[in-house]
Amino acid sequence: MAKQRKAATEGVFTARERRSLAALADAFVSGGGAERAAAAEQALGSLVDPAQIDQLRLVLRLLDSRAGGLLLAGRPVRFTALRPTSRDAYLRAWVQHRVPLLRSAASVFRKLLSFLAYADAETPADSKVRDRLKEIGYDPKPNKVTTQPTGLVAFDPGSATRIGIEVLVIGSGAGGGSVARDLAKAGREVLVIEAGALYDERTFPTRELDAYQRLYLDSGFTASSDAHIAILAGGTVGGGTTVNWMTSIPVPGNVRDEWATRHGLEGVDGAAFTRDLSAVLEEIGARESLDVPPKDDAILRGATKLGWSGERININRGECGDCGTCPFGCRAGSKQSSLRLHLNEAAAAGARLLPDCRADRLLIEDGIVRGARVTVGTLAGTPREMEIVAKTVVVSGGALRTPLLLQQSGIHHPAVGQNLRLHPVSLVAGAFPDRVGMWQGTMQAAKSEQFIAPTADRNGYIIESAPGHPGLLALGIPWTSRPEHERLMALAPNMAPFLAIVKDDGGGTVSRTKGGFPRIDYRTTARDERGLRHALGSLAQIAEAAGASEVIAAGSPPIAWRRDDGADAFAAMLTKLQKFDFAPNRGTVFSAHQMGTARMGADPNDHVCDPWGRVRSTSRPAATDPRKGVVKGLYVADTSLFPTAIGVNPMVTVLALAKRVARTILAD
């Protein structure tokens, strides 16, 4: 890691490679190429495995050679020597390359350089960013800060190299915050540690790029190893609850039945778990959205015309100004996140919070957890190691980090890091005659559950809006040429993107590379892809029925329809969507929900945790005592526990499971 930090400081590319990167930046989005290339180099050097950096360096050198032109674009030309119009043709060939590895390299550069071109920041990536945002009418005003900000104060361990605590909670998101609150209220001495920083209503960023850099895992650049799936996860105190869109939907009944019957989660299909779900909804103040912005009204309008279900979404909020900056943290103090609710209540009951504290390894001796080795002060630039001794440890690092901590702590269960579910979503956008302003108002206010039930050949899905700020939109919309990308971005004020959360079967993995970096591998199954294709057709129909003048599906090449094309052309579009190619980087796929990498269940061979959240140290049968084979005092409380995907936003479900885990800890 020291080498990686040094590389980020000194730069990871040569002068020749930087020229290629600057040419790429200008080719994807006009203007400020050299500045944006420098920002991209800094991001890549800080976040990407050196082995992958070497691959990207090779690609940049290929762009400056005739041999590279022949390989990437089928023409023996140097990309860096081409005129802008000729660069478009080169990039079209490369972006749609038949070799997945080469297509993935194009995707990395396209997404990063396009995002930086439109993501506002206190210090923009290039001097043209503000001009681009002005052209699309993006000029939101920061919401006023609440007069009652969160009162959390960071615990200061001083110069101590070893401290003791009764309960150590690793991670401060929905699961960690809830468990910490329940155990502290029960009289336990609790310390919550969080690798991210502590921000509150007074210090939340107000601009898009700043928000990703400060509040998200890997500064918002987390992705699958092939760059196919862009993954958003919280990386600050409060975790995903600090930056999510407040959508509060309990786990569907058919999923509860599956967990109980196929995975042995006793009681999850019964009245006790129903009471937990209801209690969670009451605690977080879940209620129907008061405001229905145009993008969500389009869902309701389209669903009504089609005769489909359509209803307002329950969200965990009090009164607010519907500012549209939920992904930047809630300055109004309206969002009932773990930051504002659970961690505050935990602190009031005596719990302490230590941010900028990364858990490196659990201390396990003779089958009993003894605490953890941690590094404090990495974000502050003064890292030092410390040992935290604890009788009970709850790991709540999320489905992308919890399995890595278990693995590097000697938990050799074969299912650790397996069974990753991502709720992969692809997008369809409708461009409407009137202004939509997707980045304004309640982030998600309406849904359709018309297709939430699975069928014989596909899984179910729920339809929601897909709010986006300009940087995220620029990353996600299809790229076929610079002029076409500019045209679609110009439509942004009138664009309403829709998504479908599909309950996926695909089993991904989370592991660590030789260089010590997390690696995420994921593939959809044939059944997943049938569900995704069906969803694309439904999203297109919603957009058309709501009155969109243009409908665009983010493929490579994109599948699009304009109202002037007529009904036959729309029918042809639906047919094409049923043949949509989900091969890596044929279209932009997002994930904001990660689950299953330390899943709970009755089978010791297939489930890392038992049905109550205790971590198994072995896959050997547990004989007559269900607690044999578990690490005494070690628990998981986050979405890693989910035996399967759930097909809806996971916050409510993980909060309910956290109650179950907290009761188990108290009983043990």
Image (cartoon, rainbow, N blue to C red):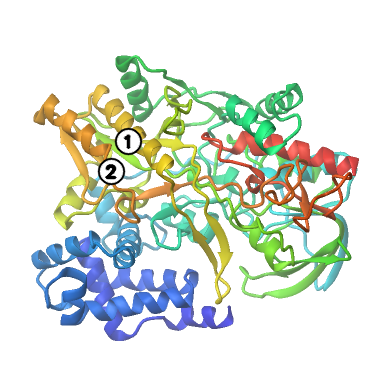
In the picture provided, is 259 more to the left or to the right than 527?
right
Kindly indicate whether the residue at mark 1 contacts the one at mark 2 (C-beta within 8 angstroms): yes
Disc 2 crowd, CA 10 A, few/some/many (<14, 14-19, 20+): many
- Please provide percent x and percent y for residue 574: 23, 32
Q: Amino acid at mark 1?
A: Leu
Q: For residue 78, which quarter of the picture?
A: bottom left
Disc 1 crowd, CA 10 A, few/some/many (<14, 14-19, 20+): many
> Pointer 1: what residue?
536
> Pointer 2: what residue?
580
Residue 86 shows which numbered tag?
none
Question: Which mark is first along the chain, 1 or 2?
Answer: 1
In the picture provided, is 503 more to the left or to the right than 297?
right
In the picture provided, is 59 more to the left or to the right than 327?
left
Report the number of discs.
2
Front-most of residues 240 and 142: 240
Dot 2 falls on a residue whose secondary structure is: loop
Front-most of residues 559 and 509: 509
Residue lying at 24% horizontally and 26% vertically, measured from the top left = 544
Residue 151 in view: no
The image quadrant where one finds the C terminus is top right
Dot 1 falls on a residue whose secondary structure is: helix
Front-most of residues 540 and 156: 540
In the picture provided, is 37 more to the left or to the right than 424?
left
Q: Amino acid at mark 2?
A: Phe
Residue lying at 52% horizontally and 54% vertically, measured from the top left = 508
Front-most of residues 622 and 589: 622
- Please provide percent x and percent y for residue 154: 73, 57
What is the spatial separation of the Cα atoms under label 2 and label 1, in whole angstroms?
Answer: 9 Å
